[in-house]
Image (cartoon, helix red, strand yellow):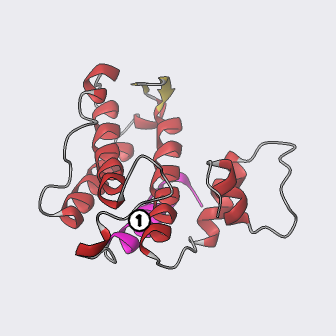
Amino acid sequence: MDLFEQLDRSIVEFGIRLRLVRAEHWMLATPCDEWDVRALVNHVVGGASRYTMLLHGATADEVVATVALDHLGGDPIGSFERRAQEVAQAFGEPGALSRTVHHPTGDISGQGLLELRITEFAVHAWDLSRAIGADEQIDPALVNEMWERLSVAGTRLDDGESRLDRLLHLTGRRP
């Protein structure tokens, strides 16, 4: 599965969970200690917007200036769908994967940024599932691709753990 299919699948995974969020869920805690459900979703939607900005030449400072904004407004699902479509289109532009972007953590290739975006959508889909009590299983083919990319030689985890659990451990979660 190529990176664009992984991006599509990770967007679907997050979107499925977002559509399950009800009014009473927005203030629930998430596995990301600093965020409730609304802040988590705002981070994901804002992240898609920031990655589009990066691919279009924004500086790290310009991107950081958007972190505290409300990216959801009164239509979180619509905002997510628009921003996810925009970032997918930006990654699909000619030369996007070979560009150097100025991410706040340092310069990175467009391909590296795409890999981060896939991880963000998928892992935060799990975070959202955990917060609202939804099914936590992520597309196994997507998990396998992410595991292959993110795992490091010598990672020691219990043999009984699923690939998803191992992936979540790598990203700082404790399923």
Q: For the residue carrying disc 1, how many other residues have a C-alpha within 10 Å: few (<14), some (14-19), or many (20+)?
A: many
| Residue at (36% x, 65% y) in the render | 28
Instruction: Report whether 148 appears left or right of 126.
Output: right
**Element marked by disc 1:** helix
Residue 14 in the image: state x and y as whole percent. Answer: 41, 65
Main structural element of the magenta stretch: helix, strand or loop? Answer: helix
**Magenta residue check for 10:** yes
User: What x and y, as percent, mark residue 104?
Assistant: 41, 24
Which amino acid does the dot numbered 1 rest on?
Phe
Q: Picture coordinates of residue 149 (x, y %)? A: 67, 48
Q: Quadrant of the N terminus?
A: bottom right
Residue 73 counted in the magenta span: no
- 103, above or below 92, in the image: above
In the rendered image, the vertical position of residue 24 relative to residue 166, given as above or below: below
The residue at 34%/22% (across/down) is 60
**Position above or below: 61 against 120:** above
Q: Give the left or right position of residue 137, taking residue 120 as reference.
A: right
* Stretch of the chain drawn in magenta: 1-18
Q: Quadrant of residue 41?
A: bottom left
Residue in the foreground of this view, choosing between 13 and 52: 13
**Which residue in the protein does label 1 denote?**
14
| Residue 142 placement: quadrant | bottom right
The quadrant of the rendering that contains the C terminus is bottom right
Judged from this view, the residue extending furthest toward the left is: 74
Q: Position of residue 105 (x, y in %)?
A: 48, 25
Of residues 33 and 78, the one drawn nearer to the viewer in this rendering: 33
Query: How many numbered marks are there?
Result: 1
Q: Is residue 27 left or right of residue 97?
A: left
